[in-house]
Amino acid sequence: MSEVLVCKDGEIVEGGVRVITAGEVEIGVIRHGGKYYAYRNHCPHQGGPVCEGVRMPAVLDIIAPDRTFLQQDYDKNDMHIVCPWHAYEFHLEDGVNVCDKRIRLQKFNVVEKNGAVYVNV
Ligand code: FES
């Protein structure tokens, strides 16, 4: 395993992404909530550049105690990465597909040290 330099800390703006190449692998490093997440930029559906898709909160149905639908709202604690090709959605936190837990993005460990950001590849 090797450590690949992504950037100096702060170069990726909040909500931003930087795609790097490590050998044959493209990795998207996303900054959200002051934290970094790194995934292979390759959607398990058909290979789309998933890390370059929009990120948006999960949509929740708000249901009344009598089980009637009230409204929808965003769950800002559950951000999704939306693949730009066919809109498969993955939880930003762990890369697991929203609809099928068997489908997941390849995740990489992110290390912050000495004022820089690295991924372990
Ligand atoms: S390639 Fe990502 S949803 Fe199809």
Image (cartoon, rainbow, N blue to C red):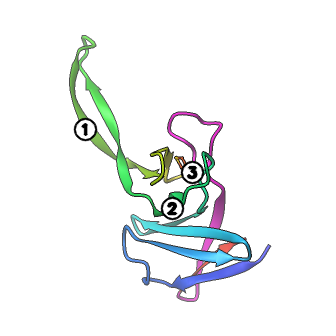
Task: Mark 3 and mark 2 in contact? Answer it, CB < 8 Å.
Answer: no
Mark 1 or mark 2, which is nearer the start of the sequence? 2
Q: Residue reaching furthest right?
A: 1
Give, as a three-letter code, the residue at label 3.
Asp
Which residue is labeled 3 in the image? 94
| 83 lies above or below 98 | below
Which residue is labeled 1 in the image? 73
SS at mark 2? Answer: helix
Mark 3 crowdedness (10 Å alpha carbons): few <14, some 14-19, many ≥20: some
Give, as a three-letter code, the residue at label 2.
Cys
Mark 1 crowdedness (10 Å alpha carbons): few <14, some 14-19, many ≥20: few
Position of residue 45 measured from the top left corner of the image (x, y, whole percent): 60, 45
* Magenta stretch bounds: 95-115
Residue sitting at x 63%, y 41%: 103
Q: Quadrant of the N terminus?
A: bottom right
Circle 2 or circle 1, nearest the eye: 2
- Please state if 54 lies on the left or on the right of 108 as rendered: left
